Each structure stands twice: as structure tokens, then as C-alpha cells.
């Protein structure tokens, strides 16, 4: 391509990307106003612009390099090979092995493994359960579908609202998502992306960001045969990867719900681990947000609380570092990393046996402290995230419909983490009745996922995180004598950990066997690391 034509094409890529962002923002605003048909048209416009940008970018390569724009080359919002610090690629080009379990009294490691397995499968099943009404923002349409479900179940039709666990919109067949046509039992686009990460973690025995990027491209790229929906971050990743942008430059300029929806496999591989060494704890991929206090903040929980007992001399893969690395492969923004780390810190506490209320409180306190690994990863966003977590805690006793109406139901932050956390806190509040016991009954999983789905909008990402948290909270503990919880490195152990999940839902989930096998491979890798 001649130089003048190349420069013109590079400028056009920027224009198309900017126009796509504007169309996306317009679509979200229209959804909030209840103008659903106009919102769908805006989303269609956004995707058309994204596709045009991708096609042109494949011929241009590095836009900032072509335009000689030094300011843009330094802008993290624009992937650029200009002035690339090769040392920054090192964490993305090596394996971070699955971490050993932190040891504790009463079979703590086996119990954590059971919770991890239930979180992974619980998240995947919940996402698939929500797919049928994913991105349905019209609550009146959901009411109609709910009435149909009630009639199908031959339940008594009354004007009073039924208990949320009596029936739900899970595995709606045929699915009614207005943005894609999938068969019932298939994961949503969020779930499909999570499975790519889960597969990579299982096959590698840990996180290798470069291998994960290859797996992601193989699953969703132009030669993959993929017949589903590619969202903004997926298209942004594919556009950058086709231009030979390695991780983290492969990541899109995006900070939506994907960062939260895919956390279960990462926490299963690296959560509930011994405290990292001082050197590991003090290291942040984004070194500008690290502080000297990090080296002294090693603790059993990644939120930064605890005594630091159990630290080992050998380097243990750090959960928050791996969350950042995986996030930046497809979403290369500080905001996406911060939200993902906050969500991971909460889920990590649940794997360690804590209650949801204590987990959210601990993460908020760690962010407010300004010290420790979580605050370091979140950087200047830490106070804002802490305030949003406090809002969730304040709404713990509020009925979910009322809380979601207040917080929001779309794919953006802060509500993409707030709404699932509120659902989990609400369910725990009513089942545990403020007791210290973390274990919830199996009915809590069904109730929570149904509540998450019923509020529509970005219900698949919401359900995925709810399913991860409630899967962990409902999982059998080692102390209860569950044989499966003692076999954390074997497929049988995974199956034993899933007894609290609804078996009828698992039977309707098309990828259940594969997800269970991948979860087992991750737990086996952790068992070998001990």
C-alpha cells in the first residue's frame, strides 16, 4: 500500500474505532431509557463499524507507527509496537504454574479444592442457564416469559409474586436473546470466552498468557469456524492480534463485564494459595501502581488482610498478577484490571471458607487502606472501587429487583460487579441469617442464579459471577466427610464437589462434561504443586 494511502487508511481505522465507541455508548443510553429497538439498531451500527475497522486494520498494522504519533504510541488505549518495552512482555511469555493450596487445620486444602471446583462448574452452568434471556432489557417481556414458565409448570397463577426459587427463566427454550441465536444449553458469549481461558489453564497447568491468546484466537478467530457472537473485546482482541500485537497489546480498549465473568477458572487455579513471597507480592505488572508497602503486605488473602502466616520461600504464582495478565490479553485497560482484581479478591476469600459479607468487607477495607497487593493492583481507582463495594454491602437486605434498579443492569462497570455481588449478599443474608457459618444450602445456588437471570440485561455475566460465588458457598466441606472433597486432584473429586449444584441443570448444560474435566485438570495441577 503506498505511503499516502496507508496513512489515510490508518486515520480511517481511528475514525471507525471512535465511531464504534460512540455507537456503543448511544446503545447503552437508549437501553437505560427503555428504547430497546433503537438500542438494537445502535448495537448493529457498532458491530458494523467494528468489522470495518478490523478489516482495514489488518492491512494497516500499527496505526500509531504508521502515523508517527508519539503521543498515541504512549497511550494505553491504543495498541502500539512503537517504543515497546520488551521487558514488559516477559510475564506474558512464561508459564505461571497453578499454585499449591494453603495448608490449614481440618482439611482446609481439600475444602478449598471442593469450593474451587464448584465455583468453576457453578459459574459455567449459571451462564448457560441465563443465555436464553441474555441482553433482554425489556422487563415487561421477561414478565411475559415468566408467566409462560409458570403456566408450563402448572403452578397456581396469582397476582402475588412467587418465591424466586419456585420457578425461573433458566435454560429458556427456545432462547430469546435479541442479539444472537444459540441452542438452549450453550454458553453465552461470556461463557464461551471463559471456556477458552479454562481450557488454556487446564492444558498448560497454569497461566501462560501467550498460549491463552493463541487459544482465544483459535476459538474465535476468522479461521476458527466459530458461528457465534463476537463482542467488543473479542473483536478488539482479534483486530490487534491479526496485526501481530502480542499480549498485553492484544487487549482491546475495553473494561466491561468480561473481566468479571471469567474469574472462576483463574481463582480456581491460583486462589486460596500460600502467601506469595515478598518479591512476588511487591511485583505488579503495572509497576506505576505498586508501592513499597506491598513487600510487607503478604497475607493468606489477596485482599491484603491477615497475618501472612504460611508464606513459603519458593515463588508461588500470585493470583492478582495472573488476573491482571489474563485480563490484559483481551481487555488492556487499568479499569478492567482493577475491577477484575476486586472481584477475584472476593472470590478468593470464599474459597478460603469465608462468608460473602466478610469477603466484600475485607476487599473494601483493603482498597481503602491504600496498602497491600489489592490496592496496588487497583492503583488510583482503589477508593472508587471501595465505595462501590460498600454500596453493595449497604444493599444486602434489599430485594434484588429494587437493588438492580438502583445499581443498573448493563454490561458496564460498576454495576457489572455490583449487581452480582448484591445478589450473593442478599441470598446469604436471608439463608445464613447473619450467622458466621459460610456454608449455604443447595437451594441458595438455584435461588441466587434465578434472581440474577430474572433482572435481565447483562444477566449472563451477572449469573456467571453469582454462580461462581454461590457454587463455592454451597460446596461440601471436607469436615462434613464428603469423599469427593478429599480427592481434589481427580475428576471424581470434582464430581463429589458438585453435589450441591442442581443436577437437572448440569444435565441440560451441553459442555458440562468438558468443563468438569478441565476443572479436574486444574485441581490436579495444584495437587502436583504441593
Image (tube, grey):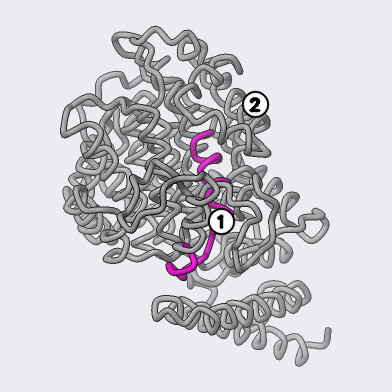
5 or 469: nearer the viewer: 469
Q: Position of residue 353 (x, y in %)?
A: 30, 25
**453 lies left or right of 54:** left
Is 506 covered by the magenta stretch? no
* 7, above or below 443, in the image: below
Q: Residue at x 62, y 48 (%)?
A: 187
Secondary structure of residue under mark 1? loop
Query: What's the magenta region?
Result: 121-142
User: Circle 2: is it few (<14), some (14-19), or many (20+) Cα within 10 Å?
Assistant: some
Q: Quadrant of residue 57?
A: bottom right
State whether residue 334 appears in this view.
yes
Name the mark nearer the viewer: 2 or 1: 2
Q: Which residue is mark 1?
A: 248
For the residues labelled 2 and 1, the Cα–Cα distance comes to 29 Å
Which quarter of the figure is the N terminus placed in? bottom right
Q: Nearer the viewer, residue 379 or 29?
A: 29
Residue under label 2, please give it.
Answer: 517
Q: Is residue 131 magenta?
A: yes
- Compared with residue 225, is residue 23 higher up or lower down, i.e. above or below? below
Amino acid at each position: 500500500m503506498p505511503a499516502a494511502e496507508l496513512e489515510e487508511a490508518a486515520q480511517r481505522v481511528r475514525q471507525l474505532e471512535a465511531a464504534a465507541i460512540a455507537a456503543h455508548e448511544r446503545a447503552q443510553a437508549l437501553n437505560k431509557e427503555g428504547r430497546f429497538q433503537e438500542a438494537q439498531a445502535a448495537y448493529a451500527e457498532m458491530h458494523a463499524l467494528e468489522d470495518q475497522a478490523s478489516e482495514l486494520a489488518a492491512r494497516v498494522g500499527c496505526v500509531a507507527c504508521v502515523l508517527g504519533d508519539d503521543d498515541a504510541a504512549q497511550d494505553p488505549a491504543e495498541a502500539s509496537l512503537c517504543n515497546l518495552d520488551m521487558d514488559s512482555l516477559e510475564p506474558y511469555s512464561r508459564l505461571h504454574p497453578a499454585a499449591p493450596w494453603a495448608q490449614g487445620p481440618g482439611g482446609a486444602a481439600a475444602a478449598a479444592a471442593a469450593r474451587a471446583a464448584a465455583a468453576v462448574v457453578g459459574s459455567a452452568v449459571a451462564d448457560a442457564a441465563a443465555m436464553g434471556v441474555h441482553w433482554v432489557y425489556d422487563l415487561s417481556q421477561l414478565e411475559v416469559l415468566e408467566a409462560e414458565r409458570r403456566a408450563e409448570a402448572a403452578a397456581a397463577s396469582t397476582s402475588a409474586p412467587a418465591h424466586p426459587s419456585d420457578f425461573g427463566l433458566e435454560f429458556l427454550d427456545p432462547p430469546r436473546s435479541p442479539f444472537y441465536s444459540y441452542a438452549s444449553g450453550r454458553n453465552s458469549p461470556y461463557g464461551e470466552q471463559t471456556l477458552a481461558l479454562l481450557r488454556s489453564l487446564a492444558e498448560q497447568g497454569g497461566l501462560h498468557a501467550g498460549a491463552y491468546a493463541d487459544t482465544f484466537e483459535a476459538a474465535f478467530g476468522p479461521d476458527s469456524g466459530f458461528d457465534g457472537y463476537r463482542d467488543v473485546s473479542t473483536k478488539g482482541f482479534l483486530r490487534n492480534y491479526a496485526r501481530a500485537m502480542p499480549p498485553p497489546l492484544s487487549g482491546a480498549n475495553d473494561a466491561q463485564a468480561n473481566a468479571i465473568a471469567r474469574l472462576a477458572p483463574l481463582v480456581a487455579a491460583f486462589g486460596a494459595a500460600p502467601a506469595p513471597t515478598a518479591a512476588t507480592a511487591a511485583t505488579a505488572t503495572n509497576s506505576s501502581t505498586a508501592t513499597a508497602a506491598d513487600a510487607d503486605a503478604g497475607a493468606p488473602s489477596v485482599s491484603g488482610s491477615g497475618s501472612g502466616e504460611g508464606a513459603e520461600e519458593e515463588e508461588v504464582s500470585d493470583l492478582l498478577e495472573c488476573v491482571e495478565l489474563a485480563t490484559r490479553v483481551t481487555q488492556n485497560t487499568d479499569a478492567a484490571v482493577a475491577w477484575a482484581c476486586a472481584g477475584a479478591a472476593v472470590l478468593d476469600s470464599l474459597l478460603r471458607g469465608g462468608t460473602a459479607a466478610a469477603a466484600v468487607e475485607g476487599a473494601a477495607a483493603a482498597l481503602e487502606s491504600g496498602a497491600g497487593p489489592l490496592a496496588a493492583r487497583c492503583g488510583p481507582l482503589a477508593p472508587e472501587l471501595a465505595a462501590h463495594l460498600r454500596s453493595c454491602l449497604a444493599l444486602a437486605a434489599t430485594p434484588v429487583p429494587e437493588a438492580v434498579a438502583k445499581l443498573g443492569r448493563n454490561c458496564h462497570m460498576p454495576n457489572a460487579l455490583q449487581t452480582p455481588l448484591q445478589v450473593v449478599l442478599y441470598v446469604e443474608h436471608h439463608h445464613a441469617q447473619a450467622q458466621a457459618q459460610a456454608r449455604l444450602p443447595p437451594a441458595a445456588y438455584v435461588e441466587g442464579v434465578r434472581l440474577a437471570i430474572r433482572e435481565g440485561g447483562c444477566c449472563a455475566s451477572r449469573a456467571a459471577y453469582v454462580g461462581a460465588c454461590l457454587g463455592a458457598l454451597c460446596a461440601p466441606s471436607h469436615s462434613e466427610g464428603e469423599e469427593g472433597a478429599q480427592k481434589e486432584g481427580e475428576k471424581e473429586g470434582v464430581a463429589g464437589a458438585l453435589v450441591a449444584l442442581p443436577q437437572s441443570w448440569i444435565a441440560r448444560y451441553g459442555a458440562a462434561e468438558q468443563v468438569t474435566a478441565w476443572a479436574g485438570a486444574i485441581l490436579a495441577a495444584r495437587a502436583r504443586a504441593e
